Image (spheres, helix red, strand yellow):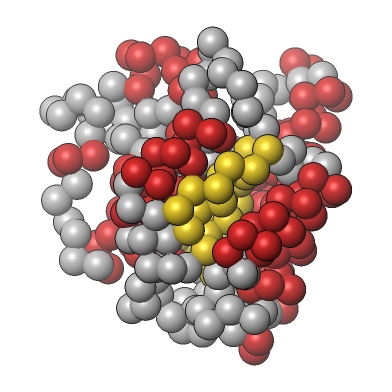
């Protein structure tokens, strides 16, 4: 296991939810955390800004850097990466967390929504990975971690929301291909996905607080992410990891502290 102290972790979509939780967990280890997200001003529907998150990560023991960045825009991504390298001298890990969701069938998914999901999820993951890789290749223990599900061609994962599934599996296909492409050069590329629903603002928009009661907090994904980023890059790559399995490998089997409402039935996340 390597330490994250002094390492620079570039996280997309880190102004709230799972991305923010991962950033805080890295910061507690003493990492430099680049908060790369769009939200620079407060949003009444989805609280949290890049500036709030960066300040929180600095208070947690790391160094936070807020960078306004739309992962759909190549120039913005390249500028964000350049700022991170200028500030911290390099990039040791990339967490592709930014994602767009629209759970609807074909006739209820406008092309605007289709394009958004594919641009943020699949294209954004590819673009951010491509921009960070020249710096990752110079790092001592480089990791790319993608928040995406295990690949599956079972029709049940496509039939109710084919556009969303295609976009998320596009992220997973980046893991499949890039892990093989960069294995000999020592860059780990893995996917991480939650076993259960995770209580975030996005989930609340989909199903409200009642649905969130049947999930776990973002901290379980964050703790699993840190465990992966601390592993030897050459011996842990090309894996489609599940949060509770990662923690079990670390000897953590009591997950009760992550429950939103202890005692409530836990609902599985999509794709599992």
Q: Residue at x 63, y 28 (%)?
A: 40
Quadrant housing the C terminus: top left
Quadrant housing the N terminus: bottom left
Between 25 and 255, the residue placed more toward the observer is: 25
User: Where's residue 112, x and y in %?
Assistant: 84, 23
Left or right: residue 28 compared with residue 171: left
Q: Is residue 66 above or below residue 160?
A: below
Q: Residue at x 36, y 61 (%)?
A: 30
Q: Is residue 127 visible?
A: no
User: Residue 172's quadrant in the figure?
Assistant: bottom right
Left or right: residue 219 compared with residue 155: left
Q: Residue at x 64, y 43 (%)?
A: 67
User: Where's residue 223, x and y in %?
Assistant: 32, 53
Q: Is residue 5 above or below residue 200?
A: below
User: Where's residue 97, x and y in %?
Assistant: 57, 46
Between 98 and 207, the residue placed more toward the observer is: 98
User: Where's residue 135, x and y in %?
Assistant: 68, 72
Between 49 and 156, the residue placed more toward the observer is: 49
User: Residue 55's quadrant in the figure?
Assistant: top left
- Which residue, as the protein is rendered here, is positioned at the far bottom? 184
Q: Residue at x 53, y 34 (%)?
A: 51
Tally the numbered discs.
Answer: 0
Q: Is residue 80 above or below residue 160?
A: below
């Amino acid at each position: 296991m390597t330490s994250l102290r002094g390492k620079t972790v570039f996280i997309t979509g880190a102004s709230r939810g799972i991305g923010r939780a991962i950033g805080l967990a890295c910061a507690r280890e003493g990492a430099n955390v680049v908060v790369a997200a769009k939200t620079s001003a407060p949003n009444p529907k989805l609280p949290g800004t890049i500036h709030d998150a960066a300040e929180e990560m600095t208070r947690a023991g790391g160094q936070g850097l807020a960078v306004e960045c739309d992962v759909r825009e190549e120039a913005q991504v390249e500028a964000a990466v350049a700022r991170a390298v200028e500030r911290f001298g390099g990039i040791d890990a990339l967490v592709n967390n930014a994602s767009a969701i629209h759970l609807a069938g074909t006739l209820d998914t406008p092309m605007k929504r289709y394009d958004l999901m594919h641009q943020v999820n699949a294209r954004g993951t590819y673009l951010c990975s491509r921009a960070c890789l020249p710096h990752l290749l110079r790092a001592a223990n480089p990791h790319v971690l993608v928040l995406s599900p295990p690949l599956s061609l079972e029709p049940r994962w496509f039939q109710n929301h084919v556009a969303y599934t295609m976009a998320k599996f596009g992220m997973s296909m980046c893991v499949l291909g890039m892990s093989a492409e960069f294995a000999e050069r020592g860059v780990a590329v893995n996917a991480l996905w939650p076993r259960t629903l995770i209580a975030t603002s996005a989930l609340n928009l989909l199903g409200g607080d009642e649905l969130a009661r049947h999930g776990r907090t973002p901290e379980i994904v964050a703790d699993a992410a840190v465990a992966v980023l601390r592993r030897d890059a050459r011996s842990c790559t090309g894996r489609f990891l599940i949060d509770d399995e990662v923690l079990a490998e670390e000897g953590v089997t009591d997950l009760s502290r992550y429950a939103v409402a202890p005692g409530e039935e836990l609902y599985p996340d999509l794709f599992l």
